[in-house]
Image (cartoon, helix red, strand yellow):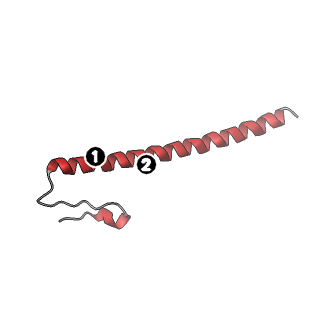
Amino acid sequence: MYYNDSMAYGKKPVIVSKNTSFELMVDETCERLMDQQVKYSIQQLNEMENRLNDMERELSAFLLQKNR
């Protein structure tokens, strides 16, 4: 079995053995990539939500000042 250096960063290790088929390795790799894409998408959505909240606060403050 071989382990990559990503174990030190809290990621799942890549394990290669004689019993693992290439198809299984590809499937597992694709699953990991999809998981990373989902995490990245959620992170981007959270950042956009924060920006939107900031803009809503700015707009509310602007409208409040304009109405005085």
The answer to whether residue 12 is left or right of residue 50 is: left
- Residue pushed farthest left? 18
- Residue pushed farthest right? 68
Mark 1 surroundings within 10 Å by alpha-carbon count, few (fewer than 14), some (14 through 19), many (20 or more) = few
In the rendering, at what x and y percent does residue 38 appear? Answer: 41, 45
Q: Amino acid at mark 1?
A: Cys
Residue 39, numbered circle: 2
Residue sitting at x 25%, y 59% = 14
* Dot 1 or dot 2, earlier in sequence: 1
Judging from the image, what secondary structure is the residue with disc 1 in?
Answer: helix
In the rendering, at what x and y percent does residue 46 appear? Answer: 54, 45
Q: Amino acid at mark 2?
A: Lys
**Circle 1 sits on which residue?**
30
Identify which residue, 21 or 63, lies in the foreground.
21
The answer to whether residue 13 is left or right of residue 24 is: right
The answer to whether residue 19 is left or right of residue 57 is: left
- Residue pushed farthest bottom? 8
